[in-house]
C-alpha cells in the first residue's frame, strides 16, 4: 500500500487548473461570424449566415445535410459512419469549425472582414 | 544478467501484459458512459502500462503502449482513432518518463497516472488540431482534463493498492 503524497495533490490541482483556464478561455468574446465556408470534394463554397438555407452535398461517398438557421450553422443529417459531425453542434462565431472526417467536409465560420469570402453563393 | 531465460521471461511478461492491456481496452469500449464524448476513455489499460514502466522498464512500457495502440486500432478502432491514440500514447509515455526519472520521490502512482492521462488527452487533442487545422478543439481539452484528473486518480489509487502486493506475489515468478 503506497500513500498519496503532496506531489499527487499538486498534479491533480494543476491539471484541474489548466482545465479551468482552458474552459474560461473558450468564453472570451469572439468575433461574430458572417459567412460559412464549406470545403468538400467539390471545392470551397461560402454562404452568408444572414440567410436561412439548407444545403445537401455529397463528398467522399457520403451525403451531408447542412443547415444555416438564425446565424448558426450545423450538420442536420449525415450518412457517414461515425456521426461525429452531428454531435459537434451549432457554430456561429468566427473560427469555429465542424469537421466530418469520413466525407472530408469542413465547415468553418468566417468573420466579416475575412479574405476567404470571395466566392459567396447567392 | 541477460541470459536466455531472462529474455524468455521478458518476452513472456510483455506478451502477458500486452494481452491484459488489450482486454482492458476492449472492456472499456463496452462501458456505456452517460457522457459518451469522443476521445473519452476510462484509461484502464494505463494500469498495465504504468505497472510495466515501474516493474519492468520504461522501454518495455513504450513497446507495450505501441503494440496496444496498434492492436486496439486494428481490432476495434478506425484510422482517425488510431492517429489520436498514437499521439496520446506518445505524450503519455513522455509524461511517465519525466515522472519516473525526475519526480519519483515526490509522486505516488496517483500523480503519475493523472499526469500521463492528462498528457494522453493533450496528445489526442494536438493530433485533432493538426488533422482539422483548427485550434478550436483545444476548448474541448478542458473536459478531457477533468476526466483525466478523475479517472487517472482512480487508476493511480488502484495501483497504489496493488503494486507492492503484485510485486511480492510474483517475486521469483514470471514478472
Image: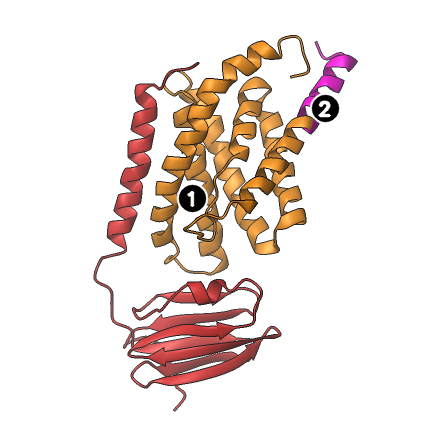
Chain colours: A red, B orange
Q: Look at 49% across and 82% down and name the residue there.
A: A56
Q: Within the magenta stretch, is there residue B5?
A: yes
Magenta segment, principal secondary structure? helix
Residue B19, position in %: x, y?
67, 33
In the rendered image, the vertical position of residue A88 relative to residue A120, given as above or below: above
Nearest the viewer among B42 and B138 is B42
Give, as a single range, the part of the protein colored magenta.
B1-15
Give the CA distance from mark 2 to mark 1.
31 Å
Residue A6 in view: yes
Upstream in sequence: badge 2 or badge 1: 2
- Disc 1 element: helix
- Disc 2 element: helix
Question: The residue marked by circle 1 belongs to what chain?
Answer: B
- Which quadrant holds the N terminus of chain A? top left
Residue A116 in view: no
Q: In the drawing, does residue A81 fall left or right of residue A111?
A: right
Residue A75, position in %: x, y?
44, 73
Q: Look at 37% across and 77% down and name the residue there.
A: A36
Label annotation for residue B122: 1
Amino acid at each position: 500500500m503506497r500513500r498519496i503524497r503532496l506531489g499527487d495533490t499538486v498534479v491533480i490541482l494543476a491539471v484541474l487548473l489548466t482545465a479551468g483556464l482552458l474552459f474560461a478561455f473558450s468564453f472570451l468574446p469572439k468575433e461574430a461570424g458572417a459567412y460559412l465556408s464549406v470545403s468538400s470534394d467539390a471545392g470551397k463554397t461560402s454562404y452568408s449566415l444572414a440567410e436561412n438555407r439548407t444545403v445537401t452535398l455529397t463528398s467522399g461517398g457520403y451525403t451531408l445535410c447542412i443547415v444555416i438557421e438564425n446565424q448558426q450553422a450545423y450538420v442536420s443529417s449525415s450518412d457517414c459512419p461515425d456521426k461525429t459531425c452531428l454531435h459537434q453542434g451549432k457554430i456561429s462565431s468566427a473560427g469555429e469549425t465542424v469537421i466530418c472526417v469520413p466525407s472530408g467536409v469542413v465547415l468553418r465560420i468566417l468573420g466579416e472582414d475575412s479574405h476567404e469570402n470571395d466566392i459567396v453563393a447567392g | 544478467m541477460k541470459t536466455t531465460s531472462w529474455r524468455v521471461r521478458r518476452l513472456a511478461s510483455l506478451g502477458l501484459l500486452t494481452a491484459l492491456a488489450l482486454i482492458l481496452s476492449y472492456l472499456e469500449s463496452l462501458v456505456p458512459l452517460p457522457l459518451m464524448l469522443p476521445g473519452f476513455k476510462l484509461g484502464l489499460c494505463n494500469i498495465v502500462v504504468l505497472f510495466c514502466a515501474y516493474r519492468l522498464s520504461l522501454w518495455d512500457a513504450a513497446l507495450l503502449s505501441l503494440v496496444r495502440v496498434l492492436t486496439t486500432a486494428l481490432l476495434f478502432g478506425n484510422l482517425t482513432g488510431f492517429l489520436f491514440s498514437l499521439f496520446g500514447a506518445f505524450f503519455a509515455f513522455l509524461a511517465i518518463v519525466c515522472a519516473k526519472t525526475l519526480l519519483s520521490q515526490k509522486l505516488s502512482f496517483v500523480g503519475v497516472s493523472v499526469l500521463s492521462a492528462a498528457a494522453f488527452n493533450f496528445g489526442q487533442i494536438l493530433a485533432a488540431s493538426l488533422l482539422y487545422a483548427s485550434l478550436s478543439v483545444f476548448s474541448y481539452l478542458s473536459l478531457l482534463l477533468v476526466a483525466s484528473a478523475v479517472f487517472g486518480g482512480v487508476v493511480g489509487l488502484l495501483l497504489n493498492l496493488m503494486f507492492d502486493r503484485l510485486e511480492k506475489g510474483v517475486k521469483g515468478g514470471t514478472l
